[in-house]
Image (tube, rainbow, N blue to C red):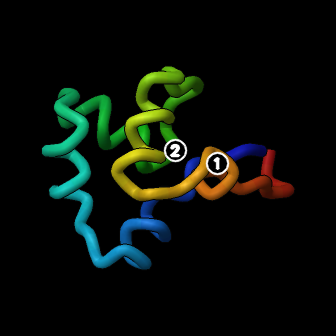
Amino acid sequence: MVKLDVLRLLEQKGKTKYWLYKQLGMSYQNFSKMVNNETKSIRYENIETLCLLLNCTPNDLFRFTEEV
């Protein structure tokens, strides 16, 4: 299973979830679902914005797990 690993990146960068939420400008419900891996899809524009804000690549944003 592919999972968004943004919380680890935030910690490494010294940023908070609240900071990221304010930067993304999306509803808190959608933001919460995204960072807690409770969504089935993420828009390309959100991936691009995350990469720009966190100074990373899409490879850094995601991790692969054996979970189903």
- Mark 2 neighbour class, 10 Å CA radius: few under 14, some 14 to 19, many 20 or more: some
Where residue 8 appears, as percent x and y from the top left, is 49, 70
Image quadrant for the N terminus?
top right
Image quadrant for the C terminus?
top right
> How far separated are the C-alphas under marks 1 and 2?
6 Å
Q: Nearer the viewer, residue 5 or 38?
A: 5
Where residue 42 appears, as percent x and y from the top left, is 52, 27
Left or right: residue 38 compared with residue 22? right
Position above or below: 14 against 40: below
Q: Report the residue at 45% width, 57% height from top.
A: 55
Q: Report the residue at 24% width, 37% height from top.
A: 24
Q: Secondary structure at mark 1?
A: strand
Q: Report the residue at 47% width, 46% height from top.
A: 51
Q: Earlier in the sequence, mark 1 or mark 2?
A: 1
Q: Secondary structure at mark 2?
A: loop
- Mark 1 neighbour class, 10 Å CA radius: few under 14, some 14 to 19, many 20 or more: some
Amino acid found under the numbered disc labelled 2: Asn
